[in-house]
Amino acid sequence: MLRITAVSIKSVTATRTVGFSSRFTDGLTVIRAQNTSGKTLLLNSMMYALGLEGTLQPGKQGILTTGLTKAVNVNGIDLPVQRSWIDLEVTNGTSVITIRRYALPPDGISRDLITVWDQPLLSTNVNDVRQPRHYYVGRGGTAQNESGFHHYLARFLGWEIPSVPTYKGKEVPLYLQVLAALFFVEQKQGWAGIVPKMPTQYQIREPLRRSIEFYFKLDVMERARRRAELQQGLSVIRAEYATLRGALDAAAHVSNARVTPTSDFGTPSFYRSPLFEVASDSVEAGEVIAVYHDDGWENLTAALQRLRASIRSLSELDRSPLTEEGAGVLGSALHEARERLREITTELQSLDDSANMLDMQRGTLTKRQRLLEQEQRRYKDIRSLENLGAEFSRHAIAHHDCPTCQQSLEGTELTTGAPALSTAESAALVDQQLQTITTIIEDAARSAHTNEVIRGALERESGEIRSRIRAIQADLEGQAPRTSLAQLQRKITEEARVQELVRLRDNAQVTLNDLLDAQRRAITIKDELDGLGEDEFSPSDTRKFEMWQRTLQNLLQGFHFGVFAPSEISIDAQTMRPTHVNGDLGFQGSASDGLKLRWAYMLSLAQTSGATGGLHPGLLLFDGPRMYDVEGSAMKPFLQKCASVPVNGRKAQIILTLSEDPQVIANWLSGHEYQIIDIEEKLLS
């Protein structure tokens, strides 16, 4: 929930300060004044203080009058404004905060800076004013970053802002400027049409539908959010799969081999059939990798069997006994080979230990890197806020508080009396630490790669030595071959090829297992995606939607809606627009009937959201709701309803502007509680 408890507007000139202040309660507040007296400025100032001017128009300027931005008229004399600001006190039902935003800031402070005190400074007399926090608006990250004001405001309201699709195919937050269009109606263009005028500059697809789904907490929106999340998961797996498949094909190519083709990722056959047309939990690399031989392709298993058979045939030639001298030479060679094999085994064990340590080190360093990157982003935000005029150096660092988390640094590795680093120095230190950590991680990665290369070379040498040991042992057993040099060369070549293909098979098996795991995860996600179904209402959604329609019809009945019978008006579940049984309204009635439909739409939305546990803030700001000289017989029930709209067990707060005589307003609201704020001459005077 969001309630405005107080507002203060100040313009400072060279000779005096002029301004306006007021307090607000739940229920209806009527701001009454003649035209051009500042009613619109008051509501626009509240929106400006909340950083929600984007609800009114794409730009940041133009919603505040010259009394705040250029000159203020005092006793008929225009006095130039030196600085001006709006203070707004709001509550979420539990906590109260005071927000300040400058309309014309002093030197060194930007309009995009918002200052927040976590205490009421307008409605109560506070002796001990706490240090404020600073946030920014009007730039990237306002809705996502910790120092963005709308990120803070959403958390203050207890909202978890969903991501929604744009026309460009991206996902963006459902910005508060868009959501605000359903609780604020400005006077100039806001009452035109039968549904709220939604901001278009954020390129959100179906912003009205997305906003209403959010306020009603419809299951269909959760399904849409989950669908987007799952589709993003599939995109990640797709990239992972492409990388693995590319690595497998590249490894096979080096050994003059190829991998059995598979269905492309994401195709129906990919989700329906196991990879390589074999059981998904028993793929053998030797069955899906093929080598070229005798003008044809044979699988790796068959190739290894053929090569090993050829090697055995070459080893089974006629043998003759060794001489004693030859046996001695071979014995020495066997001893050297065994010693070298033991050395290699020890080195491989050492490499394994080193690899494990490097993995642990890289994991720890990567975690530290993520923390430093987060800290770097925080300092970046702080630097941005300081550039906007926030005084972090004085109120945070000089008071021994961390400028990122605001917690005390007393007693934490500081020498008493030692100077604290400035924000710039702290940011530079974090940058240096991040650079150092990144360099260490890169060095660890290079070391790991070097170890892999060394391991590969040692494994190849180990294989060669084992072959040599077997050959020497065979010779020592009196089986020295009588063979030609060509046959001997062929045997050596084929043994080397066997070792190469075995390495390919073993390494490919690891990659194949990862590919199969990626397919299994993709199928799991695809099954959940298919199970979500279309964007259809759940039974709970339907109950909420039907309640909304009934509430809308009842309000139309009470407002004397005349162009159609209120029971013939419904809300289209796709567009969220009011419609008639015979088609779109359009609008086919009088301007005043269109206005009544807007009243009923906004009020029924707030009331139904509150009755169903939704997220509507329970705040409505209506600037000039009596457009088109709507008849008093309709204004009376409208204002009476505004005075009693229930939201979450209490009255909604509705602040609206009128120009009628106070006695007329009193007659319309006779017997109902309300607050009236009279602006006698000018808001700023």
Image (cartoon, rainbow, N blue to C red):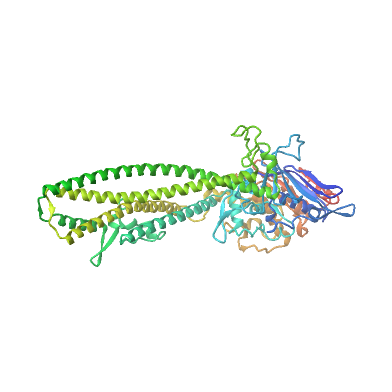
Quadrant of image for the N terminus: top right
Whether residue 182 sits left or right of residue 533 in the image: it is: right
Q: Based on the displayed image, in which of its 4 quarters is residue 129 positioned?
A: top right
Residue 484 visible from this viewpoint: yes
| Percent coordinates x, y for residue 248 in the rendering | 36, 57
**Residue shown at the point (84%, 51%) measured from the top left:** 682
The answer to whether 27 appears left or right of 441 in the picture is: right
Give residue 449's position: percent from left, percent from top: 40, 50
Which quadrant would residue 91 be assigned to in this image? top right
Taking 178 as reference, is 8 above or below it? above
Q: Which of 455 and 667 is in front in this view?
A: 455
Name the residue nearer the viewer: 556 or 663: 663
Residue 500, image x, y percentages: 28, 56
Is residue 229 placed above or below 583 in the rendered structure?
A: above
Extreme residue in the front direction: 325
Residue at point 61% right, 56% down? Answer: 208
Q: In this view, does 305 lie to the left or right of 443?
A: left
**Residue 658 shows up from this direction:** no
The answer to which of 626 and 166 lies nearer the viewer is 166
Above-or-below relation of 683 to 25: below
Q: Nearer the viewer, residue 273 or 243?
A: 243
Instruction: Tell me: 446 left or right of 646.
Output: left
| Residue 42, above or below 402 | below
Residue 196 is situated, as x and y percent measured from the top left of the image, at: 67, 57
How many discs appear?
Answer: 0
User: Residue 257 occupies which quadrant of the picture?
Assistant: bottom left
